Amino acid sequence: MKVVLTASELRKWKRATGRKVDGAVRSRLAIKRANKIGTAPDQPIDGPDLGSGRNR
């Protein structure tokens, strides 16, 4: 599944968490988005669910 993360979504996550956006973060956010899309196909995506990034 192809997932598009916009620069504004990544900036929002960075401001919310204070952490650096790198390849690992982008991968984790894309997987989270894909899982959200895959588990609730009939529900609209209401924006980035980027979380705090603290769950590792």
Image (tube, rainbow, N blue to C red):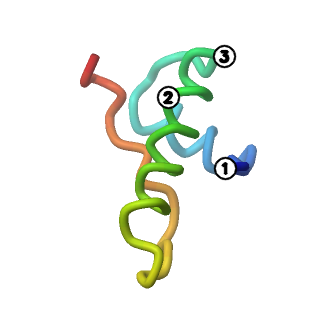
Q: Which residue is mark 1?
A: 1
- Kind of element beneath mark 2: helix
* Residue type of the residue flagged with mark 2: Arg
Whichever of labels 3 and 1 marks the residue nearer the N terminus, that label is: 1
Whichever of labels 2 and 1 marks the residue nearer the N terminus, that label is: 1
Q: Residue at horizontal 44%, vertical 23%?
A: 18
Coordinates of residue 52 in the picture (x, y in percent): 32, 34
Quadrant of the image for the C terminus?
A: top left
Coordinates of residue 20 in the picture (x, y in percent): 56, 16
The front one of 46 and 11 is 46
On screen, residue 25 above or below 6: above
* Residue type of the residue flagged with mark 1: Met
The front one of 42 and 16 is 42
Q: Which residue is mark 2?
A: 28
Q: Please state which of the two labelled residues, at mark 3 or mark 1, is closer to the viewer.
A: 1
Q: Which residue is mark 3?
A: 23
On screen, residue 26 above or below 3: above
Q: Mark 3: give few (<14), some (14-19) or many (20+) Cα within 10 Å.
A: few
Disc 2 and disc 1 in contact, CB within 8 angstroms: no
